[in-house]
Amino acid sequence: MVTNRPDINQVLSQMREMKAQVQAPDLSMPNIAKISGEQGDDSNTIARPDFAEMLKTAVDNVNELQKNASNLAQAYERGDQGVDLPQVMIGLQKSSVSFEAMTQVRNKLVDAYEKIMNMPI
């Protein structure tokens, strides 16, 4: 059975962890900005993540996945004993999927920017 393979289960658990992180961000992170209410009291304080920092972190993560996939592929080509083909293919697929997702985010951001710029004043 394919689902009993540890590499697939590992990928699935990583995907679940990423989903949980996106749905419930850690408010103790340093890139969280506090926005307070009109009266200046802390009762209306809302935690909001810093968009630029989040985007930079996402791009860095995609870059790291691509580097890891490249290193795995090179190690396999050299014949390193600790690297097998399924491990290389999973690394390459992770890299490809994360890059595609980042490309889609970029496209949505460009589209939103164009819509804002075309709004009548």
Image: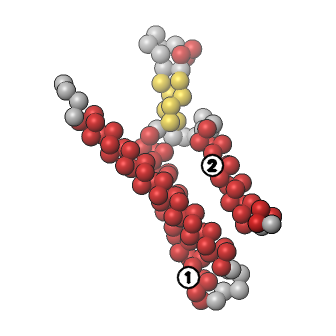
Q: Kindly report the distance in space between the C-alpha atoms of the residues bearing marks 1 and 2.
A: 27 Å
For residue 61, say whether it is visible.
Answer: yes
Specify the farthest residue to the front.
1
Q: Secondary structure at mark 2?
A: helix
Q: For mark 2, does the 10 Å Cα neighbourhood hold few (<14), some (14 to 19), or many (20 or more) residues?
A: few
Taking depth in this image into account, of 56 and 105 the one nearest to the observer is 105
> What residue does disc 1 label?
74
The percent position of residue 26, horizontal first and vertical second, equals 62, 38
> What residue does disc 2 label?
18
Q: Quadrant of the N terminus?
A: bottom right
Q: Amino acid at mark 1?
A: Gln
Question: What residue is drawn where x is 76% and y is 66%?
Answer: 2
Taking the image as shown, residue 110 lies to the left or right of residue 1, namely left
For residue 68, say whether it is visible.
Answer: no
Taking the image as shown, residue 117 lies to the left or right of residue 99, namely left
Q: For mark 1, does the 10 Å Cα neighbourhood hold few (<14), some (14 to 19), or many (20 or more) residues?
A: some
71 vs 105: above or below: below
The percent position of residue 115, horizontal first and vertical second, equals 28, 36
103 vs 64: above or below: above
Specify the farthest residue to the left.
121
Q: Amino acid at mark 2?
A: Met
Taking depth in this image into account, of 31 and 116 the one nearest to the observer is 116
Question: What residue is drawn where x is 57% and y is 79%?
Answer: 73
Q: Quadrant of the C terminus?
A: top left
Question: What residue is drawn where x is 60% and y is 35%?
Answer: 27
